[in-house]
Amino acid sequence: MAFKRKKKIGRPKITRRRSNMVNTDYMGSDVYYHSLNPRLTWHVKGADRSPWPKTVIGRRSSVGIMILIVLILCVCWWLIAGCLFYVRSDFVKHEDKKKNGFKKMNFKVCEESFQDKRSYIQDKRREDWNDLPMIYFSTSTYPWADQMPKLLKLGYTLQHVPRLHWMVTDFNPTCNEYLSALLHKFHIPFTYLSNRLPDVFYNAKFEPQGFEDKEAGIKWLRSRNITTGILYFGNDDNTYDLKLFQEIRSTSLVSMFPVVLTNQNGISGPLVREGKIVGFLTPREDGRRWPVDMAGYALNLSYMPKYLNAGNMPDYEEEDYLLRCLPLNMDIIEPKGNNCTEILAWHTRVRRHRDSFLIRFDYEYLDNRSNLGSLFKSLYQMGIVELSDHERKQIMVGQNGEPIPLSYLLA
């Protein structure tokens, strides 16, 4: 008699494609799910389809491969970030210099001259200007190839400004006789400071960014007990309209005005509506409280006596540190240059790309609801910017440290 094999109790073995018409009463939930896709096959013994290896050696190999992939990605990101964000290296060098005593300013006064030897200034005798407040024009310079031509151009501009004292901070470790002779050439009062920095500064071929001169200049003002007059920071590679000095001389607390050719917007400065500053043009999103260029504001020294006596300047890499030290708000800032509609300061350093700035600016805002309409019309006529109402990056306005679209303020 033939032996009859007993049937095994369990789910049937599925080895062929199934149609979507299945008997759900017969099949379990797992079988029903796989039966909905006719391309799937499923076996009872091979139900565990996890990609994780079953053996210890296989698992260790997988972990090693994953760690190697992560390391390769980190190295690639480090290389890409080093190329894309190379401009941030200057700030890293600033941190290195501070750790090596960079904050210990070791400046000395090379030469001073408080005598104004000009006989006539703007068709008037020198004595006719004695009632005007003094402007202390602070400039940092570095012994690079075009140092003397820049100072020569700037000196002949300042020669036409009455009641001005030029503070020149040179990052040369020793006093330069040729620079001293150049300053005497303009017959205006000046102070020549040599700011000795640590040797690592010069060995690394580090180019100062203009922040380092401010502490030396303010310390000199404090040592001379000068608490009246107007303080202005002017770079040696900038170009200035003579009207700028007439405007800032009447600064009672803090005054601001636009500076052209500074960033990707082509201009940096306040946003003015109805004679009051309500924000600042800025391409940055770094949360600065006062996102303005150093050449875009002037201070009355009588407004900052506490700061002059405060000692060193920590965190002076940030350009708005001086303004953050003051009890300042937008209600007391004075917009100069016909409510910031005139261009009086130019950042005329050499640009890599000489093409016009491409700006997204809605045409409906080219009216008189703010100072930006007049400014961007002038920049367009000069060929500095190309305007579009639908292309390029939108203009942002800094307000209370937060960047917001321009349309929110002008709508």
Image: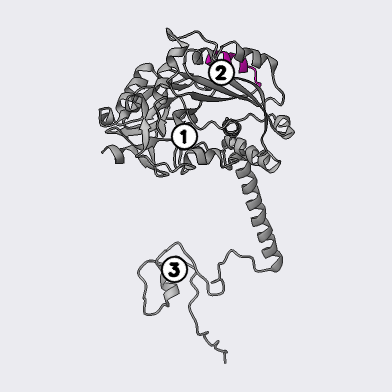
Give the residues drawn in magenta, as a range: 143-154
Give the class, few, some or many, for how many residues have Cα within 10 Å of label 1's Cα (few <14, many ≥20). some
SS at mark 1 in the image: helix
Q: Which of marks 3 and 1 is nearer the N terminus?
A: 3
Viewer-nearest residue: 269 or 50:
269
Residue 34 tag number: 3
Disc 2: which residue: 189
**Is 146 covered by the magenta stretch?**
yes
Cα distance in 3D space between marks 3 and 2: 91 Å
At label 3, the amino acid type is His
Seen at 67% across and 38% down, the residue is 104
Seen at 44% across and 39% down, the residue is 290
Residue 302 tag number: 1
**Is 180 covered by the magenta stretch?**
no
Q: Position of residue 386 (x, y in %)?
A: 37, 23
Q: In which quarter of the image is residue 197?
A: top right
SS at mark 3 in the image: helix
Q: In this view, does 172 lie above or below 315?
A: above
Q: Quadrant of residue 117?
A: top right
Residue 341 tag number: none
Cα distance in 3D space between marks 3 and 1: 82 Å
Viewer-nearest residue: 302 or 74:
302
* Foreground: disc 3 or disc 2: 2
At label 1, the amino acid type is Ser
Q: Where is residue 299 in the image (x, y as percent from the top left)?
A: 46, 32
Instruction: Please indicate, yes or no, whether residue 282 appears anywhere in the rendered image.
Output: yes
Seen at 64% across and 41% down, the residue is 95
Q: Position of residue 223 (x, y in %)?
A: 60, 33
Q: In which quarter of the image is residue 368?
A: top left
